[in-house]
Amino acid sequence: MPGALPTRPGAAARSARSLVPAGLDGQPGSRAHALAAAVPFCAMAVVAAADMVAGPQVGLLPLLSLGPALAPVSLRPSRTVLTGGLAIVLSVLLASYDRIGLSLHTIVAFATIIGVTAAGVIASAARQRRERELVNIRAVADVAQRVLLRRVPRQVGPVQIAVRYISAAAAARIGGDLYDVIAVGPTARLIVADVQGKGLPAVQVAAVVLGAFREAAYDAPDLAAIAEHIELSLGRQGPGEKFVTAVLAEIAAERAEIKLLNCGHPPPLLISGDQARLAEPPEAGLPLGLAQLATSVRKEHTVPFGPEDRMLFYTDGISEARDTAGNFYRVQGCGALLGGPEPGAALDRLYADVLTHAGGDLNDDSAALFLIR
């Protein structure tokens, strides 16, 4: 969907409830999780069969404790207790089958199973507690994501818009890559940016940048004024010395052009007909947060952007994705992937190609914003 919230590869944004690990403790899940729940019982069945074949002289009864030992990986505490009880019952039946009765060997087996079951119950309870904490953390992260990376308008004037965000970390929902689109009547102003660094400090800086952009985009006379406002906000509110690479753009419905202000960011890809080229600025610009090092004021530049033209904005998680040989992904070579009338589908094809290039795993967060006029 063009205005979709950020996603991880191959999955839509999930609700907090769906973040509970699938397949554990009765939750619906994949075959892999169902197999994990069956492992303790399979282990006890194998031990029981081996004991019946080998006889009492081998002494395999204590190995029935493998069941309750493996149970905490996939089962809740109550089911871990039931697994231990089943192991005790099997021990009694095998002792009767082996005709060893309540011997020292049987008592040792009982004690081993009871001890392992008790430890398994503690481990299972601790695992469940950690899972609940993770669900709560991810729920908070999802709320923060919706505040920071809001849904963008699907269309502003004649321009269709789609966005995608992919986190490199399995548990992450937000990071230092950011984007937003503000509709000012039929005119769209947008930002795509990447905060230096990772973790919570990067998220804090991203929040400052987005807040400043959203405040200035409505009233600022031009893109340079928006960048200046973001600079001031970073100086006042930014945690530590962080800088942000960014590209700002303005598309007015009545003009067949797009205004760009590049602040040390990878240049967007302009696709016009069968031609794809990087819309590089005439002069390199410093990232936001480094204005004190500038020797001149920031200057926007204009490139043609007429009917049926397309433009891809992206962060370096895409342009610096490497294959096994260490080669970067060639953004300027992906123009053919970005055809078709649906911008969201075009971004899906792009990300599929990037993931294929990188061997299915991205080492950095990435954001992409795609425009079709």
Image (spheres, helix red, strand yellow):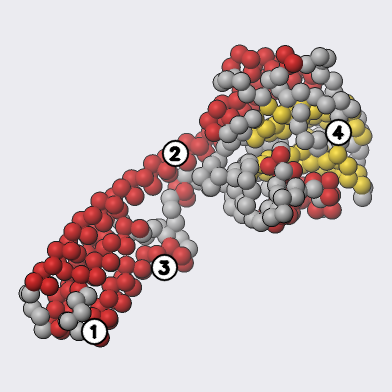
The residue lying at 75 percent from left, 47 percent from top is 328
Marks 1 and 3, Cα distance to the nearest angstrom? Answer: 27 Å
The C terminus, quarter of image? top right
| Mark 2–mark 4 distance (CA, rounded to whole Å) | 40 Å
Q: 10 Å neighbourhood of mark 4: few (<14), some, or many (≥20)?
A: some
Q: Residue at x 20, y 79 (%)?
A: 58
Locate residue 79, reporting x and y percent. 27, 61
Which residue is labeled 2 in the image?
Answer: 137
**Kind of residue indicated by mark 1:** Ala
Residue drawn 76% across the image and 32% down it: 265
Name the kind of residue labelled 2 in the image.
Answer: Ile
Look at mark 3 in the image and give the residue it sits on: 35
Q: Is residue 219 visible?
A: no
Relative to 44, is 372 on the left or the right? Answer: right
User: Label 2 vs label 1: CA separation?
Assistant: 51 Å
| Structural crowding at the residue carrying mark 3, measured as other residues with C-alpha within 10 Å and reported as few (<14), some (14–19) or many (≥20) | few
* Sequence-first disc among 3 and 2: 3
Q: Secondary structure at mark 3?
A: helix
290 or 151, nearer to the observer: 290
Distance, label 3 to label 2, CA atoms, is: 28 Å
Q: Which residue is mark 4?
A: 280
**SS for tag 4?**
loop
Using the image as rendered, state which of residue 352 and residue 13 is in the foreground: 352
Disc with the residue nearer the chain's start (2 vs 4)? 2
For marks 1 and 3, give the one nearer the viewer. Answer: 1
| Residue topped by disc 1 | 54
Q: Nearer the viewer, residue 218 or 204?
A: 204
Height in image: 255 above or below 221?
A: below
* Residue type, mark 3 in image: Leu
Task: Give the side of residue 346 with respect to residue 7, left or right.
Answer: right
**First-in-chain label (3 vs 4):** 3
C-alpha span from label 3 to label 4: 53 Å
